[in-house]
Amino acid sequence: MKINIDEMKNEIINTNLSSSSSSSSSSSLSPNLYKSSSNYIIDNIIMICNYNSNMHLLSYNYLTNLDSQYANVLIILSMLSGIIEIINFNAHISNNIYLFVGIFNLILGMLLNKYKELKLNTNAQTHYEFHNHFEKIKIKTNMNNNIKNSKAFIYKNIDYFIKYTNNEIEILYTTRPKIPVKILNKYDINKINIELKNNNQVYYTKRKSKVFDINKSFNFCDMQKIPEKDKQEYTDFMENIRKKNIEKIKERNNNLIHFK
């Protein structure tokens, strides 16, 4: 895809930074693209980027650990097969052991092919890249929001910056990998609520947050303020991560103490 630099400059970048009069006239000619306040749109972008950044980081850690576990199991099984074959060769225990080892190696080969098809390490690295992308947008948004009234701000106005950032996030939403189900369950993402209503009928409802639904993208320009219910979901998610990280650190310290 080719990028027209001149068009991008005309639409987004403020080329009149040196002239305050030109800058003010340019601002007056720039329409207000968004009906809602740019302040809470910026807050929405930062919050959602932080949410998605953590989701992809959790996915990266999970897939990396899973990849190591698979690799270690395959290595141990391969070594075990080799040791059994060597012992039988030297001790002449039974010819049937060669048949057993042969069948075992066939199964091991099937497991190895399955492991390669999963591409756990590749998927983990992809999640890490998207974690970095969301982190960069979050930092850039926070920085530009702080300097929007200064000469260091390179965009025509904050509306153009939001429009440009919205396009960046839209691309990430449409190209990013799926979050592992294990992570969704572990952190109660879009969890199922079970309710008992009249006549003892059980209702299963799966609440999908309008803001933090990982399966959809949206236009920040049309967004309203994030509802309190969604903010609470975000807060619970971040608190859950913090608690689990503390538990991991305590467990690691306890293991080191017992090891000593």
Image (tube, helix red, strand yellow):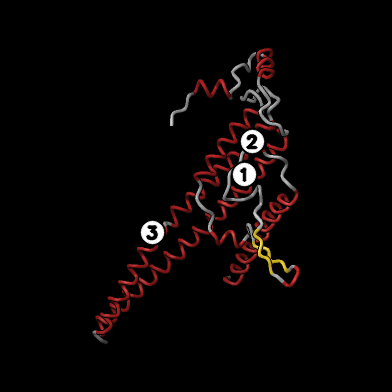
Q: Look at the picture and state if 13 lies above or below 206.
A: above
Type of amino acid under label 3: Glu
Residue at 34% in and 72% down = 107
In percent of width and height, residue 201 lies at 70, 70
> Which quadrant would the C terminus be assigned to in this image?
bottom right
Q: Earlier in the sequence, mark 2 or mark 1?
A: 1
Determine the secondary structure under disc 2: helix
* Residue 140, quarter of picture: top right
Residue position for label 2: 141
User: Foreground: 22 or 194?
Assistant: 194
Q: Earlier in the sequence, mark 2 or mark 3?
A: 3
Q: Look at the picture and state if 209 lies above or below 73.
A: above
Give the Cα separation between the discs numbered 2 and 3: 38 Å
Residue positioned most to the front: 199
Evaluate if marks 1 and 3 touch, with contact meaning CB atoms under 8 Å apart. Answer: no
For marks 2 and 3, give the one nearer the viewer.
3
In percent of width and height, residue 241 lies at 65, 57
Give the Cα separation between the discs numbered 1 and 3: 30 Å
Residue at 71% in and 25% down = 149
Q: Name the mark on residue 49.
A: 1
Answer few, some or many: residues within 10 Å of disc 3's Cα (few below 14, many 20 plus, some between 14 and 19). few
Q: Earlier in the sequence, mark 1 or mark 3?
A: 1
Residue at 60% in and 72% down = 258
Give the side of residue 243 with respect to residue 179, left or right. right
* Residue 100, quarter of picture: bottom left
Type of amino acid under label 2: Thr
Answer few, some or many: residues within 10 Å of disc 1's Cα (few below 14, many 20 plus, some between 14 and 19). many
In percent of width and height, residue 175 lies at 49, 44
Evaluate if marks 2 and 1 touch, with contact meaning CB atoms under 8 Å apart. Answer: yes
Residue position for label 3: 117
